């Protein structure tokens, strides 16, 4: 008889969906996530399609489903070290990294107030800082602080522990291993933004006011580094003109030779962030081709109807800093207008693509771009962007189907 438990690797929207869908029909699920919180990339968005809801709209409901369901076990700060066995009876070794904060935490913030050390806030892509004792974000699940010991400049410092009146901090925590038995495994490992620093001509990391599309999501978010104000990084000034650069590294044999499918809609959505919050701001979107399939065509038409948004067909060749203003100078071809153009702006947003975040694994089958293909090992599946680049809605739909497949593995074995 097979083990009636499903392991889901990755706690983003796809992993969460797989876990709750399987658990709510009676199967035990173990959800593991390497970060100290669930939610993945969706938690970092300001809004997502199709309803342009804040991410917590959907995540909070799912967190409640997890909390109330005894069939779901969650391990954050956890990685899969080893998998052995076969469909219906896998042995999995997990490595659980220390959080240094236990379940007694009430999120009172006393530890952060007492902490003297700071760290770059990776949730905000380094655009601001947190204390070494920090809450990952305002709706973090679990709602519990974490301590980044690597950021502690004095290893003997225990000010956070002394400030905690609930005995929730244990600086003696060590990594530990946990071995579990499961019948099937779902990889929902999500994605990373393509490293914009790989493209020297686009100026990321060299030109101060060049950011990526995910950084733009954090700038526009009420819980982001600027409280939702769209300010340029160099001097905190409100932007008046922004240029979006599509296919930044995508559809390029030297970088990503594929289209990530969501970048065009992301830039159109972000153009509305700027126009809604800064009425006199202008936006230009330089594109190769626009991908707005099916129901999204109406949204494209709405953005095109805005007289302060201009879509220009043309590939960007170079982005440089305007030394006179601190802004940017973008050089690109204008296919329809003819010739080369030089446009000045306050800020540039690079629409970087999705890259698979899963590591090499002998039991997984990868297609040429690093995404997981099903079929190599019975009982092991992938879902969401671990399988292919996709938007939130498509990922949720796929995860629901994958939950069924993982259940079928348990039944037939």
Image: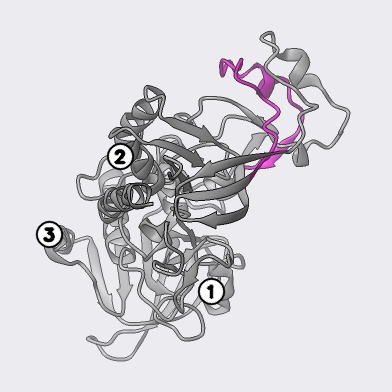
Q: Residue at left 16%, top 60%?
A: 296
- Say which quadrant the N terminus sits in: top left
Q: Position of residue 332 (x, y in %)?
A: 39, 82
Q: Is residue 128 left or right of residue 210?
A: right
> Can you identify the residue that label 1 sits on?
320
Q: Is residue 257 above or below residue 62?
A: below
Q: Earlier in the sequence, mark 3 or mark 1?
A: 3
Mark 3 residue element: helix
Question: Residue 222 at x, y = what percent?
Answer: 40, 35
Q: Residue at x 60, y 42 (%)?
A: 78
User: What residue did someone put label 3 on?
Assistant: 295
Mark 3 or 1, which is nearer the eye? 3
SS type, badge 1: strand
Residue closest to the eye, 40 or 343: 40
Question: Which residue, as the protein is rendered here, is positioned at the far front?
Answer: 1
Q: Magenta segment: does it hold 266?
A: no
**Extreme-top residue of the structure:** 165
Name the quadrant containing residue 227. top left
Q: Which badge, 1 or 2, is on the more N-terminal residue?
A: 2
Residue drawn at x 25%, y 46% as measured from the top left = 276
In the rendered image, which residue does mark 2 sit on? Answer: 21
| Residue 60 as seen in the image, left or right of residue 276 | right
- Measured from the top left, where is residue 251 in percent x and y? 39, 81
Q: Which residues are magenta?
A: 94-121
Task: Look at discs 1 and 2 and give the one toward the viewer.
Answer: 2
């Amino acid at each position: 008889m097979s083990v009636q438990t499903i392991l889901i690797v990755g706690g983003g929207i796809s992993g969460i969906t797989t876990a709750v869908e399987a658990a709510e029909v009676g199967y035990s699920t173990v959800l593991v996530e390497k970060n100290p919180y669930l939610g993945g990339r969706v938690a970092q968005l300001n809004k997502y399609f199709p309803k342009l809801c804040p991410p917590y709209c959907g995540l909070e409901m799912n967190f409640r489903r997890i909390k109330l369901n005894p069939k779901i076990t969650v391990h954050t700060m956890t990685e899969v070290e080893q998998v052995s066995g076969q469909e219906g009876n896998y042995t999995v070794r997990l490595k659980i990294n220390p959080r240094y904060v236990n379940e007694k935490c009430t999120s009172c913030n006393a530890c952060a107030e007492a902490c003297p050390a700071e760290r770059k806030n990776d949730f905000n892509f380094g655009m601001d800082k947190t204390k070494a004792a920090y809450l990952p974000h305002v709706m973090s699940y679990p709602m519990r602080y974490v301590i980044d010991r690597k950021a502690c400049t004095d290893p003997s410092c225990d000010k956070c522990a002394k400030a905690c009146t609930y005995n929730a901090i244990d600086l003696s925590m060590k990594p530990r291993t946990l071995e579990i038995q499961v019948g099937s495994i779902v990889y929902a490992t999500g994605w990373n933004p393509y490293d914009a620093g790989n493209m020297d001509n686009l100026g990321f990391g060299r030109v101060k006011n060049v950011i990526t599309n995910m950084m733009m999501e954090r700038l526009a978010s009420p819980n982001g580094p600027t409280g939702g104000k769209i300010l340029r990084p160099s001097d905190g000034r409100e932007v008046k003109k922004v240029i979006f650069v599509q296919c930044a590294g995508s559809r390029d044999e030297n970088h990503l030779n594929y289209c990530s499918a969501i970048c065009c809609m992301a830039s159109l959505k972000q153009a509305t962030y700027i126009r809604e919050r800064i009425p006199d701001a202008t936006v230009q979107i330089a594109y190769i081709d626009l991908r707005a399939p099916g129901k999204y065509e109406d949204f494209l038409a709405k953005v095109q109807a805005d007289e302060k948004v201009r879509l220009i067909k043309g590939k960007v060749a170079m982005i440089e800093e305007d030394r006179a203003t601190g802004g940017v100078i973008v050089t690109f071809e204008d296919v329809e207008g003819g010739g080369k153009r030089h446009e000045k702006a306050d800020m540039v947003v690079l629409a970087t693509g999705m890259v698979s975040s899963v590591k090499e694994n002998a039991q997984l089958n990868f297609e040429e771009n690093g995404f997981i293909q099903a079929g190599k090992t019975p009982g092991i599946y992938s879902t969401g962007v671990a399988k292919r680049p996709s938007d939130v809605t498509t990922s949720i739909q796929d995860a629901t189907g994958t939950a069924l497949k993982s259940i079928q593995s348990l039944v037939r074995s």
